Image (tube, rainbow, N blue to C red):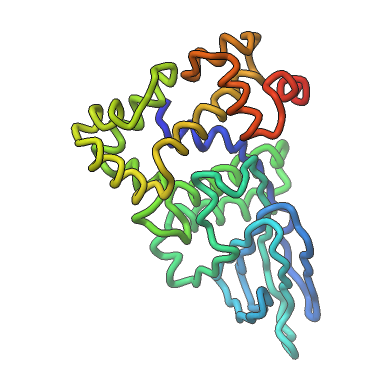
Amino acid sequence: MNPLSEILSDLKIQGSVYFCDYLNPPWDMVHTQEPRAMFHLVRRGRCFLSIEGNRYELVSGDFVYVSPGVDHRVTSAEGDKLDSLLLCGFSTFEADKNDLLVRDIPEYIVLRNETLQDYQWLRRTLEHLSAEYMSDQPSVEITINKLTEILIIQLLRSEFGGDNNVGIVAAMRNKKLAKALTEIHSDLSKPWTVEAAATQASMSRSGFSKLFSETVNISFFEYITQVRVKRAKRLLEASKFSVAEIAEQVGYQSELSFIKVFKKAAQMTPRAYRISKA
């Protein structure tokens, strides 16, 4: 599996649209302590977004993404007598604060209509979401949920709002790093070291280590540990392999050393994790 595809799969992204309709002013939407990521698209009319002490006027075509836990409020414009058409959705994913894809996403992002011209795939997906939600066709909920998942995946793949030169996506654009990462993910059972990875990238140990940490923004050791733990979690959930067998498959020669690393990362033993997911 491609490294980026595997990382995206591990996030277990889910989402849906919870509102797409006309609003007659005055109206007010308040989101407090929301554990899910939220997004809003102004399809027609205008409104105001209040977030993190800032206030933005949003007009037709403007798009907003808000990270989980960020309080915000969307309201009608004072004195406005025209209806507004809003598309609002949410997304959840299994990720901690150090996840390779979601850690660098800002608390919120406001994309103006003119900027969205550069994200035609986003515009088309949002338009499709709106049309499906308002169509009232059979099984429309399934289509909406899948489209929302695709929307979030595309946002993450494009490093939406992040630094295009830093992160796992940037690493996969670098031919040398991509070759090493692909080899690592294809056979995680090997005793991967910086030297071994550098050989796959046709680089010196020091050169690879520097490039990797500057691009991925964590050390090679941190990365390989995170990937091994995530692969182990997937195997614990979906397979009947013993803990010892899983330890070997993810690159640990000793079951005890694997349990120690896993417990530090997951705050529980592999067996306890498997039971919790049963």
Q: Quadrant of the N terminus?
A: top left
Q: Is residue 30 left or right of residue 216?
A: right
Q: Residue drawn 39% across and 19% down?
A: 191
Total count of labels: 0
Whether residue 49 is visible, yes or no, is no
Residue 267: image x %, image y %?
70, 34
Viewer-proximal residue, 230 or 118?
230
Q: Can the viewer see residue 39?
A: yes
Which quadrant would the C terminus be assigned to in this image?
top right
Q: Position of residue 160 (x, y in %)?
A: 47, 57
Vertical order, 198 against 89 (above or below): above
Q: In the picture, residue 171 is in which quadrant?
A: top left
Q: Nearer the viewer, residue 15 or 120?
A: 15
Residue at image point 26% right, 32% down: 198
Residue 260 x %, y %: 61, 25
Identify the residue at image location x=28%, y=29%. Answer: 195
Instruction: Please name the residue shown 77% across and 65% down the image.
Output: 31
Asked if 22 appears above or below 201 in the picture, the reply is: below
Splitting the image into 4 quarters, where does residue 39 fall?
bottom right
